[in-house]
Image (spheres, grey):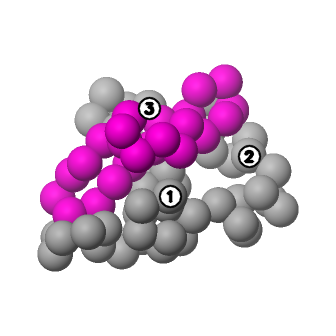
């Protein structure tokens, strides 16, 4: 599943539910597509990534993958 399957109008309004920054295309450590915060989220160098299930981004802060940018 690719993030390109998300409708363009929806991509324009999606934001990280924690820091409200734009979400950009990314790839998880397992190689799956995900949406990632474009800027630091809550701490310097820390960002969140949200998985995509069946073309639907799961924008739940508790289920986000936290990584260092």
Measuring from the top left, give residue 32's x and y in whole percent.
Answer: 44, 32
Residue drawn at point x = 36 percent, y = 39 percent:
62
Magenta stretch: includes residue 67: yes
Residue marked by disc 3: 32
Circle number at residue 6: 2
**Which of label 1 and label 2 is nearer to you?**
1
* Residue 69 seen anywhere in this rendered image of the structure: no
* Residue 58 seen anywhere in this rendered image of the structure: yes
Q: What is the secondary structure assignment of the residue under circle 1? A: loop
Instruction: Tell me if label 1 and label 3 are in contact, CB under 8 Å.
Output: no
Q: Between marks 1 and 3, how big is the CA–CA gap? A: 21 Å
Could you classify mark 3 by the number of other residues whose Cα lies within 10 Å: few (under 14), some (14-19), or many (20 or more)? few
Q: Between marks 1 and 2, how big is the CA–CA gap? A: 17 Å
Instruction: Tell me if label 1 and label 2 are in contact, CB under 8 Å.
Output: no
Could you classify mark 2 by the number of other residues whose Cα lies within 10 Å: few (under 14), some (14-19), or many (20 or more)? some
Q: Earlier in the sequence, mark 2 or mark 3?
A: 2
Circle number at residue 17: 1
Magenta stretch: includes residue 56: yes
Q: Between marks 2 and 3, how big is the CA–CA gap? A: 15 Å
Residue drawn at point x = 81 percent, y = 50 percent:
7
**The C terminus appears in which quarter of the rendering?**
bottom left
């Amino acid at each position: 599943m690719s993030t390109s399957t998300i409708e363009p109008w929806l991509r324009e309004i999606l934001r990280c539910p924690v820091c409200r920054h734009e979400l950009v295309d990314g790839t998880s450590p397992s190689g799956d597509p995900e949406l990632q915060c474009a800027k630091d989220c809550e701490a310097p160098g820390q960002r969140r990534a949200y998985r995509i299930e069946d073309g639907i981004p799961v924008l739940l802060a508790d289920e986000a993958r936290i990584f260092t940018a």
